[in-house]
Amino acid sequence: MKKVKGKVAIAAMFVVLCWAYSPIGIHLGLASYSPGQLALLRFIIASIFMGIVAMYQGVQVPKVKDIPLLFVLGFFAVALHHIALNFGQRGVSAGAASVLAQSTPIFTVIISRCVLKERINAWRWCCVFGGMTGALMVVIGDKGIGNISLNGLLILVAACSWSVYFILQKRHSQRYSTLTLVCYTVWTGTAVLLVFSPGLLTSMQASSIQVNFAVLMLGVFPSALAYVAWAYVLSHSEVSKVSIVLYLIPPTAMLMAAFMLGELPSALVLLGGAIVILSVLTMSLEKR
């Protein structure tokens, strides 16, 4: 039992490091690629890697009636999420982007109330208000009140897109294994992103080795290996307990951005980030 717990802890920290690297890798990749090209190249790499994993682990063959659902999952989890993320990060620092992306549970509550008509108690609405206030502080504090742009809002669109995916995936997860859903979500999302293929090869040839290596890392670790590791963590522990470790992603991303990119977050970004994380964490603990 202790050996299994140790492996789960290592896998969880591996996931944190992978997903904390994601905004740094995006920042580096945008130096040579357009947001659409970067998303496509990242998930071509991830699709190849997940194909290798599927060959060894095996995945279920989807039913014909479920193919539209799989494309919807791929659209929200991969295509829309990463296009909004990449466009947004052109004007948002890596550390601030990691904080704003962590607001997904806030949008999950809003969508559950407005679309699914679920009852939300007053405490959770307070958490939503606090989280949105913190997100606004991050947007303002990242570039200064005189340089506010729509880029931060695009990061929030990416978080909202992930919330839609999370709700849909949760409702249909009983049909397929976690690995099967991850594989088909990556593959269908990549298929949608093929609209950005024109000019990709030219951009690859013009890009430096350092940038291409950063994108390779982005495709293998945050986009593929992290999902496999997270599936392992979830299969050996309770979701409500282990999900708390994900709140380590923003501070880890800020530390990585400081060392790799020289980005130092402002005091307002740190304060807003703390409010976002605290609001989401409080909401998670209240549900438990």
Image (cartoon, rainbow, N blue to C red):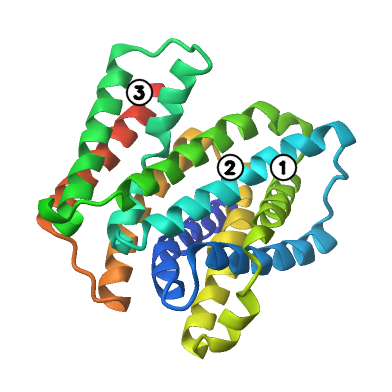
The residue that appears at 53% across and 74% down in the rendered structure is 215
Task: Please give the residue where the numbered disc 2 appears in the rendered image.
Answer: 76
Give me the disc on residue 71: 1
Q: Position of residue 44 (x, y in %)?
A: 67, 66
**Residue 288 seen in the figure:** no
Q: Position of residue 256 (x, y in %)?
A: 32, 70
Q: Quadrant of residue 52?
A: bottom right
The residue that appears at 72% across and 50% down in the rendered structure is 188
Q: Answer left or right for 183 relative to 5.
A: right
Q: What is the distance, in whole Å, between disc 1 and disc 2 at their CAs?
A: 9 Å
Q: What is the distance, in whole Å, between disc 3 and disc 2 at their CAs?
A: 27 Å
Count neighbours of disc 1 (C-alpha within 10 A) and say few if under 14, some if 14 to 19, many if 20 or more.
Answer: many
Q: What is the distance, in whole Å, between disc 3 and disc 1 at their CAs?
A: 33 Å
Depth check, front residue: 72 or 222: 72
- Kind of residue at disc 2: Phe
The residue that appears at 54% across and 87% down in the rendered structure is 206
Q: Answer left or right for 111 relative to 127.
A: right
State which mark lies toward you, 3 or 2. 2
**Residue 172 seen in the figure:** yes
Task: Please give the residue where the numbered disc 3 appears in the rendered image.
Answer: 286
- Kind of residue at disc 1: Phe
Give me the disc on residue 101: none
Depth check, front residue: 86 or 288: 86
Tag 3 and tag 1, C-beta contact below 8 Å: no
